[in-house]
Amino acid sequence: MYFDTKNRTVFSPQNDKLMPFYKVLEQHNQTLGGSNLFDDLVETYEYLDFVFKDKEETQDEPITSS
């Protein structure tokens, strides 16, 4: 899933914990889209999605000892 804003395309999150945040952004895109506040919220959402994705990948890596 995704939706387009005035400045970018916002994709659904990799982590389900962020789905409520995504839905709020999608719902308010028409009224707030293009504003500085909305752009900041989208950047925060994308950053959190990246952090959660990176954390999941790190946990999936096998532990090796030397």
Image (cartoon, helix red, strand yellow):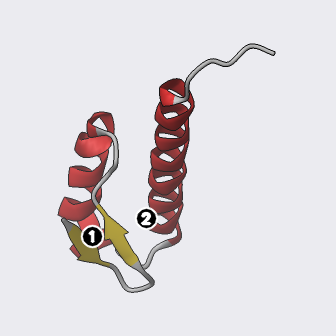
In the foreground, 20 or 62: 62
* Label at residue 18: none
14 to 63, vertically: above or below: below
Q: Residue at x 68, y 19 (%)?
A: 64
Q: Are marks 1 and 2 in contact (CB under 8 Å)?
A: yes
Q: Quadrant of the C terminus?
A: top right
Is residue 54 found left or right of 38 in the rendered image?
A: right
According to the picture, the residue beneath numbered tag 2 turns out to be 38
Inspect the image, locate mark 1, and give the three-letter code of the amino acid beneath it. Asn
In the foreground, 40 or 19: 19
Quarter occupied by residue 55:
top right
Instruction: Count neighbours of disc 1 (C-alpha within 10 A) and say few if under 14, some if 14 to 19, many if 20 or more.
Output: some
Residue 36 drawn at (x, y percent): 53, 70
Q: Does dot 2 land on a helix, a strand or a loop?
A: helix
Q: Quadrant of the N terminus?
A: bottom left
Furthest toward the front, the residue is 66
In the foreground, 31 or 7: 7
Q: Does dot 1 land on a helix, a strand or a loop?
A: helix
Residue 8 drawn at (x, y percent): 42, 80
Instruction: Give how far apart the Cα atoms at labels 1 and 2 are.
Output: 8 Å
Furthest toward the bottom, the residue is 6
Residue 48 drawn at (x, y percent): 50, 44
59 to 41, vertically: above or below: above
Inspect the image, locate mark 2, and give the three-letter code of the amino acid beneath it. Phe
According to the picture, the residue beneath numbered tag 1 turns out to be 29
Task: Pick whichever of labels 1 and 2 is earlier in the sequence.
Answer: 1
Q: Residue at x 18, y 61 (%)?
A: 27
Residue 24 drawn at (x, y percent): 24, 52
